[in-house]
Image (cartoon, rainbow, N blue to C red):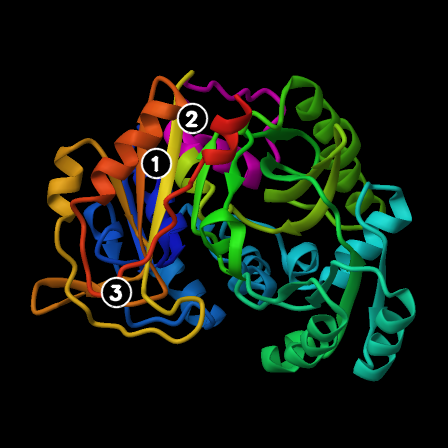
C-alpha cells in the first residue's frame, strides 16, 4: 500500500514509526512531516494541510491507497470528505463526525441526549450571561471551555470567582473558537485517556494511558497540549475498562449513528474517574498526543492493517494484542510554553539518547543547515519501554538527561501518581 500521513508532530512521528513496520506498506509519504518522520517517509513540505484540493491532487498523483490524518484541524476542515469524494480511502472521521472535537457543545449535547456520563454544563454565546451564571452558581473550582478548536489550550479550571470571570474574557483570545463557551462543573478524580479504533460499528479500545496536561510538576501551571504520558494507566482497571466500553464508547458510536453520523477512525475519550465511575471530560476525533507515543510502542499488531479495516468498515474480525511492558513519554518543551517561546535553538544529545534505548519522537523540530533546532512549543517526546513502570520511568529520565537545548523545560513527575498508588 502507498500511504500518505498528514501532520508534523510527535503523534505523527509515532504513527509513521508504527506504520513503517507494516508488511503491507510499499511507500509512505508525509505532509509536511518533520526531521524524525523523514526517517520513515518521504516528506513533502510545500503543501498546506489546510488545502484539501492540493492534498487530494497529491494523493491521486502518487496513487495513495490510504490517507492517515493525524491532527484534528484537517478532519474538522472536511479533508476525509474531500478524499472520499475523489474515491480515496482515509483513516479519520468525516467533517460532521469530527464535530466531536470541533465543537464541545455538539459533543456535550449529544452526551446529554443519550445519557452518556459527563459533567453537568451550560452553554453560552453571551459572555455577560456566562458571568451572571457563574456568579449565581458560586461553586468553585469551575471549568470554562471554548467551544471550538484551541490547540488543547481552550480549557480553564478556575479556582475563584475572579479567575472564572477572567476566564470568560480569555475565551475571546481563541477567535471564533471562543464565540460560544461551555461552563461545566468541576469533576474531582483521576484523569485517563482511552483511545478506540472504530469502523462505525465495531469498537476496539486501546490500552488506557494517562496524560499530564499542566505545564509544571504536581499538576501546577497552565494547561498545555500534554507534557508526558504513560501506559497502561492502572486507574483504568478491568472493571473501569469494561464500564468505559459499555457505557461510553459503544453508546457514543451508537448515538452518532442514531443521528445519521457514521464515525470511522480513532475516537479519543478523555475521562475522569470519580469514585470508581468513568465520566467523559472531552472527546477528540484523532489519536491523542502524547498518548500515542506510549500506546503504540505496546501494540503488537500491524497498525496499518487496523487503520485500513476502519476505513473499509471491516474491523469486525480484528483483535488487538498488547505487550505486557510499560511505556513512559516525557515531553521536552521550549521555555515559556504554552505561552511565548523562542525557536531555532540547537538541540544536542538526541543520538546519544537513542543509544540508551529511548525512542525520540520529534514534535517541534526542523533542520537548519543540517543541524537539528527547535521549531515549536513541544519539541521532543522521549519514550522508553520496560518490564514495569518504575523501570520505564527511570530509563526515560536517563535518556532525557543527555538531551539539551537552551531553556529546555520538562516535568520530572511523569507517572509519579501511578507509582504512588501502586
* Labels 1 and 3: the sequence-earlier one: 1
Give 208 or 84, whichever is nearer the viewer.
208
Q: Residue at x 42, y 41 (%)?
A: 413
Q: Is residue 124 magenta?
A: no
Q: Is residue 228 left or right of residue 31?
A: right
Q: Which mark is residue 18?
A: 1
Q: Secondary structure at mark 1?
A: helix
Q: Residues within 10 Å of mark 3 (few under 14, many from 20)?
A: few
Q: Which mark is residue 184?
A: none
Q: Verify CB contact (< 8 Å) between mark 1 and mark 2.
A: yes
* Labels 3 and 2: the sequence-earlier one: 2
Q: Is residue 321 magenta?
A: yes
Residue 352 position (above or below residue 46): above
* Labels 1 and 2: the sequence-earlier one: 1
Q: Residue at x 64, y 78 (%)?
A: 170
Which range of residues does the magenta coloring cover? Answer: 295-323
Q: Is residue 265 left or right of residue 37?
A: right
Task: From the image, tell me which residue sits under label 2.
Answer: 299
Amino acid at each position: 500500500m502507498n500511504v500518505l500521513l498528514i501532520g508534523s508532530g510527535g503523534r505523527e512521528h509515532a504513527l509513521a514509526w508504527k506504520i513503517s513496520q507494516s508488511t503491507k506498506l510499499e511507500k509512505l509519504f508525509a505532509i509536511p512531516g518533520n526531521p524524525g518522520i523523514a526517517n520513515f517517509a518521504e516528506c513533502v513540505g510545500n503543501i498546506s494541510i489546510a488545502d484539501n484540493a492540493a492534498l487530494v491532487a497529491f494523493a491521486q498523483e502518487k496513487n495513495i491507497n490510504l490517507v492517515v490524518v493525524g491532527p484534528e484541524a484537517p478532519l474538522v476542515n472536511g479533508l476525509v470528505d474531500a478524499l472520499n469524494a475523489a474515491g480515496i480511502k482515509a483513516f479519520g472521521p468525516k467533517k460532521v463526525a469530527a464535530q466531536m472535537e470541533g465543537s464541545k457543545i455538539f459533543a456535550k449535547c449529544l452526551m446529554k441526549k443519550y445519557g452518556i456520563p459527563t459533567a453537568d454544563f451550560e452553554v453560552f454565546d453571551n459572555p455577560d450571561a456566562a458571568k451572571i451564571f457563574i456568579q449565581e452558581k458560586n461553586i468553585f473550582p469551575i471549568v470554562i471551555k471554548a467551544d471550538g478548536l484551541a490547540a488543547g489550550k481552550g480549557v480553564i479550571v478556575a479556582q475563584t470567582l475572579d479567575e472564572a470571570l477572567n476566564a470568560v474574557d480569555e475565551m475571546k483570545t481563541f477567535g471564533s473558537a471562543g464565540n460560544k463557551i461551555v461552563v461545566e462543573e468541576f469533576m474531582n478524580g483521576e484523569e485517563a485517556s482511552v483511545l478506540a479504533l472504530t469502523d462505525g460499528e465495531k469498537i476496539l479500545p486501546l490500552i488506557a494511558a494517562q496524560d499530564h496536561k499542566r505545564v509544571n510538576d504536581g499538576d501546577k501551571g497552565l494547561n498545555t497540549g500534554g507534557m508526558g504520558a504513560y501506559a497502561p494507566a492502572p486507574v483504568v482497571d478491568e472493571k473501569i475498562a469494561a464500564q468505559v466500553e459499555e457505557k461510553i464508547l459503544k453508546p457514543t458510536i451508537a448515538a452518532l449513528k442514531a443521528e445519521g453520523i457514521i464515525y470511522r477512525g480513532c475516537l479519543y475519550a478523555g475521562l475522569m474517574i470519580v469514585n470508581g465511575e468513568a465520566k467523559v471530560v472531552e472527546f477528540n476525533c484523532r489519536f491523542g498526543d502524547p498518548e500515542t507515543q506510549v500506546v503504540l510502542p505496546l501494540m503488537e499488531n500491524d497498525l496499518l492493517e487496523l487503520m485500513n479495516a476502519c476505513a473499509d468498515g471491516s474491523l469486525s474480525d480484528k483483535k488487538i494484542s498488547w505487550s505486557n511492558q510499560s511505556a513512559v513519554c516525557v515531553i521536552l518543551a521550549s521555555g515559556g510554553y504554552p505561552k511565548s517561546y523562542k525557536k531555532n535553538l540547537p538541540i544536542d544529545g538526541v543520538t546519544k539518547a537513542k543509544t540508551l534505548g529511548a525512542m525520540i519522537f520529534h514534535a517541534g523540530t526542523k533542520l537548519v543547515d543540517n543541524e537539528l533546532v527547535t521549531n515549536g512549543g513541544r519539541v521532543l517526546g522521549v519514550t522508553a519501554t520496560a518490564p514495569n513502570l518504575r523501570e520505564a520511568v527511570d530509563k526515560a529520565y536517563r535518556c532525557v538527561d543527555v538531551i539539551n537545548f537552551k531553556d529546555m523545560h520538562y516535568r520530572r513527575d511523569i507517572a509519579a501518581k501511578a507509582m504512588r498508588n501502586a
